[in-house]
Image (tube, rainbow, N blue to C red):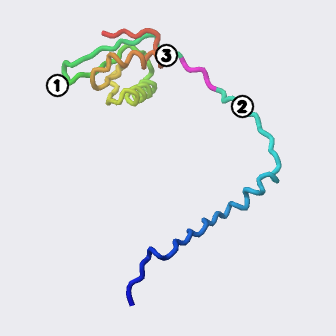
Amino acid sequence: MGKRDKKDEPVAAPAPFHNPFAALAAKREELPVGTVAPVAAPKSKPEPKGPARAVVRMERKGRGGKEVTVVEHLELPAPQREVWLKALKNSLGCGGVVEDDTLVLQGDQRERLPALLEARGVRKVTVG
């Protein structure tokens, strides 16, 4: 008794996949046509205008030689300063902190920051 060659055996076709929802496809035409409800536009609150101006400058003094970008003269209330700082940190990909009434962002962000501030409603951005 020798070993059988498997090459001689015909290859059986795989069993068809059992799809439990295949019978539902034929009944699709029998379903009633529904009405499409009009989608109401969401009522958006008008964006509050941003501060009139902001001064953006780079600073190293007193920070161990590390560069930071300071945003001054925003004249925002304290809770709103935190919201602005978080949004700027996320969009710039850097760290930051609120010191007194200024926003301090890590690194030299003077080139990228004015466009972000103008998008948030600041009318005049001075880069120093």
- Asked if the residue under mark 3 is in contact with the one under mark 2, i.e. CB atoms within 8 Å, the reply is no
The answer to whether residue 44 is left or right of residue 37 is left
**Residue in the image at 37% along x and 28% along y:** 89
The answer to whether residue 42 is left or right of residue 14 is right
Tell me the crowding category of disc 2: few under 14, some 14 to 19, or many 20 or more residues within 10 angstroms, Cα based.
few
Q: Position of residue 17 (x, y in %)?
A: 60, 65
Comes first in the chain, label 2 or label 3? 2
Magenta stretch bounds: 44-48
Considering depth in this image, is 82 or 1 the residue closer to the camera? Answer: 1
Amino acid at the residue labelled 1? Gly
Q: Which residue is mark 1?
A: 64
Calculate the distance from the C-alpha at mark 2 to the C-alpha at mark 3: 27 Å
The C terminus: image quadrant:
top left
Which residue is farthest bottom? 1
Q: Position of residue 49 (x, y in %)?
A: 53, 16
Residue 40, label in figure: 2
Comes first in the chain, label 3 or label 1? 1
Considering depth in this image, is 57 or 51 the residue closer to the camera? Answer: 57
Q: Which residue is mark 3?
A: 121
**Residue in the image at 60% along x and 20% along y:** 46
Q: Is residue 46 magenta?
A: yes
Amino acid at the residue labelled 2? Ala
Residue 23, image quadrant: bottom right
Calculate the distance from the C-alpha at mark 3 to the C-alpha at mark 1: 33 Å
- Asked if the residue under mark 2 is in contact with the one under mark 1, i.e. CB atoms within 8 Å, the reply is no
The answer to whether residue 58 is left or right of residue 117 is left
Calculate the distance from the C-alpha at mark 1 to the C-alpha at mark 2: 55 Å
Comes first in the chain, label 1 or label 2? 2
**Residue in the image at 21% along x and 19% along y:** 60
Of helix, strand and loop, which mostly describes the magenta segment?
loop
Instruction: Indicate the secondary structure of the residue bearing disc 3.
Output: loop
The answer to whether residue 11 is left or right of residue 21 is left
